[in-house]
Structures are given as structure tokens and as C-alpha cells.
Image (tube, rainbow, N blue to C red):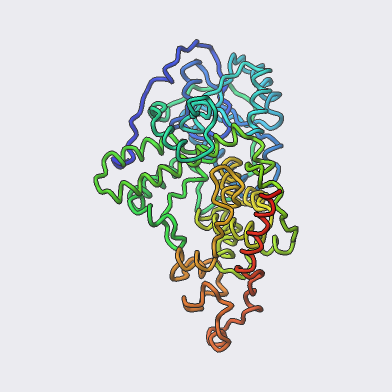
Amino acid sequence: MPKHVVMKCRTASTGRKVTKVTTAIWWARRDLRLADNQALNLALNRADTVIPVFIVDPQLMDGSAPKRETFLRNAIASLADEMRTRGSQLILRQGEPIQELRRLMEETGAQIIIAESDHSPFAKARDNRAAAALPIEFTGGITVHPPESVRKPDGSPYTIFTPFMKFWKALPMAGDPIPAPKSLPAIPELTSIELPAAPPISDFPAVENFAYERLREFFHSSIFDYGEARNRMDIDGTSRLSPYLRFGLISPRVLISAIFRVIEETDNKISKQSCIAWLNEIIWREFYFNILDHFPFVLKMSFRENLRSIPWRDMPSDLAAWQNGLTGYPVVDAAMRQLNETGWMHNRARMITASFLTKDLLINWQAGESWFLRQLLDGDPASNNGGWQWAAGTGTDAAPYFRIFNPVLQSQKFDPNGDYVRRWVPELAKLPKNYIHSPWQTPMDVQSQFGIRMGKDYPLPIVDHQFARLRTLQAYKSAKSD
């Protein structure tokens, strides 16, 4: 591992006083990794035998997010392979988690269950029920700092990012990353279901080691240009680690430990600022986890009470055009087609498409939130909701409601040669760059020259941006005045 990603590892447990037991169950959920797994590490320190189990919950794997479920199945299979090479086995069960855990305790004589905390309303309700019924202990790991540790001096939660970030950075690092165990204790023979094989995802192999390879590659190729490159949709300037964070194939603590080391070793001011910009993106993730933990109602309504009565348009045809990448705005359509095909989208593209849906089409952000959560490999309730409410201007520390992205200007700035558009909207591939961002302005003779007919081979814009901007400003103002 290159020096910029060398982890300062500890070999001890979390430092807490532990009571040894004979058998513990490690309940794997969103921590499908061996390295820096606080729950697994605690279980190994607490028990002579550790039973690893993943429970397929029908409420979560219901076919509503097929791409993410494919990634999850691949990640489970990869983790199972890694455990076999270390002498153990990942037990798979399917059903209601409490019932399956109780059954597994009876089969193995396990005295304790250990799992990583989660902070979504669904997960917290599930875990509260489990804690009331079973001897279960939860550890950190899904965030660097748990939500209860990042609070204002009066104990209330932060709702503005900058003071949250400053407080977060002032906290001591929550321990060093823990190395993956070289071996695992053998477990008794137990029944385990088999998940149907899932096709591999070429751009995102669901393998723990690949997450580290991607981190190393990013640190070698892009991290020092991240401050500028992160907004360019036509180049590979981001880490693309979000799906691995989503399912815990790599821990946020590993990323923070690595970037802190790079920042400390970097003398160039611009390079250091690029590294800090990437660090701040990880902190945004933690910020949205905190918001969801303290204000779970954001999954059902706008955070800002004075923007809960926006007169959204109910236009299924416009929503479908947006979902399918047929709006007539090339950068929007390119981004939506990339999402639908790959399950991933550049962050700048997420902002552009979200702004277009909510402020050009004046369609409720919840429709976009739902579509993204269905399509995204990294779809996470906290980050997805936070991003959508930020774009719509309805959330905590959100973009002002009057900030409305011009999709043509965004395309010109962040895809200057039109390479991103050409890749994902091939019907426009032959157009020169002075027309690629607003192809409806292409003269008829140029259309004929390049073999494309606007309105036939590619749709005309479904809305005029300037008209839409004025309409949205009026709609938001009316909501604020109610």
C-alpha cells in the first residue's frame, strides 16, 4: 500500500473493559468488510467463537432497488469468500431479524450479539426492538463520529454545515483503523441459505480489496486536483467510493485516516486545499447522518416549515421525461441515462438534475428522491434526502430557493467540450461543441450536415428555462408568504 494510504493500525480492541464469553454472534449489516470493522473486532475480543451472520430482510431486499441489491449480493458473496480463506463461514439466513437471531442463538449457545449501529429511522426502530428482545451490543463504525457526539455546547444538534464541520474537525479521531484479522475462529456446522448469483457490476466490483485499490488510485491520480476536477463531469476526477461506503466495504475512518496523513504531508497550498475539499465531502455525509438521526421527519417532509406548501406541479409526463433522459436538455439527459444504466452519477450531475426537476419542472423533490433511491448503487436515505432537500432549497443549510441552475451554462462550464454529453446521448455525438449544449439552436443546414433532426432524433426542450425560473420564484415566494 503506498505511503499516502498506509493505515496506522491498532491491534487491541476498542479499549473498553470486556467480559469474555464462549460464543458471540456478529450481525453484519452495512459493514461488509473485515478491515476496520469495530463490531467484528469487539466480537473477536469478547468470545472464543464468533458466528458471522447476514440476515436477508425481505422488507429491505424487496426488488425496489435492483441495482443496489445486485451490488449487495455481490458484496455478501465476496465477504463470504474472504471469510472462508480465513477459516470461518458467513452464515446467511432469511426472515425477520429478531426471530432469526434468536434461532441462531439457540442453535449455537451464543451469549451475545454484536452489531454496528445504524441511524436511519427504519434501522433504529429495528435495533430498538432487537435490543429489547435479545442480548445485543452496538458499536460505532458507520460514521467516524456518532451523531450524539457532534452537538452544540447546549446539547442541541447542528443544522448548519460550517459550524458542524468545525466542531467535527476539532474532535479527536475516534481510534485508529483496525487491521483485518489474518484468521478467524472456526464455527460449528450450521444451515445457511444460498443467495442467487448476481451479475458483476463492471464499474463497481463489490469487493473490499477493490475499494482499497480505488482509494490508492484516487490518491495517486486525482486527489491533488480534486478542488477543480471534482465538478468536471467529462473527466474522472472523483474517488467513486460512495457505493463502498454505503455498504461498508470500506470504513469512513479509513478514509479520514488516509486523508489526514496526506494533508499533513502535503506542502503545496493548492494540493492541500484539494485534499481538504475531499475531506469536507466526507463530513457532509456525516452531517446528513446527523440531520436524519435528530430530525427523522425529513424523510416525509421539508425541513424548512415555511417551504412545506410549495404548489408543486403534478405532471407525470414531465417526470417520466426527466426519469428517462428525454427532457431536451443534453446535460440533464446524459446524467439521467448514466444513472439508469450504471447506478451512479457524478455529484455535479446530481445537483444539476435535482435542480432541473424541482426548479425547472417544479416537481416535488420527493419524486426525485424516490427515483434516485431506486436507481443509485450508493442510495442512502440520509445523503439522498440531504442532497435533494439542499437542491430544492427546502432542507437544512440548503441552497437558497432563488438559486436555480441554468442547465446550459452548467453544461458549458463543467462539460466544456461536450464529451460527457456525447458519451451518454449518442444521438448528439456528431454535433460540434458550439451546439452540443443547446442543440435546439442548431440551424437546419447544420442539422442536415450532421444527420440529426431536432424534435425527431432528439427531443426539443420540454420547458423554457427562463419561463421556468420565473414560475419557480413565484411558487416559492407564495409558499413563504403563507
Give the residue at x 36% y 53%. Answer: 222
Looking at the image, residue 481 lies above or below residue 404: above
Task: Please identify the residue farthest to the bottom as the structure is shown.
Answer: 445
Report the front residue among 463 and 127: 463
The image quadrant that residue 291 belongs to is top right
Report the front residue among 482 and 23: 482
Q: Quadrant of the N terminus?
A: top left
Task: Please identify the residue farthest to the left as the structure is shown.
Answer: 267
Looking at the image, residue 250 lies above or below residue 335: above
Q: Position of residue 452 (x, y in %)?
A: 58, 81
Looking at the image, residue 212 lies above or below residue 473: above
Is residue 39 in sight in this rendering?
A: no
Report the front residue among 219 and 205: 219
Q: Position of residue 129 (x, y in %)?
A: 68, 23
Q: Position of residue 315 (x, y in %)?
A: 74, 61
257 to the left or right of 127: left
Is residue 306 in sight in this rendering?
A: yes
31 to the left or right of 192: left
66 to the left or right of 241: right
Give the residue at x 65% y 17%. Answer: 134
Q: Position of residue 158 (x, y in %)?
A: 52, 34
Task: Please identify the residue farthest to the front as the structure is shown.
Answer: 481
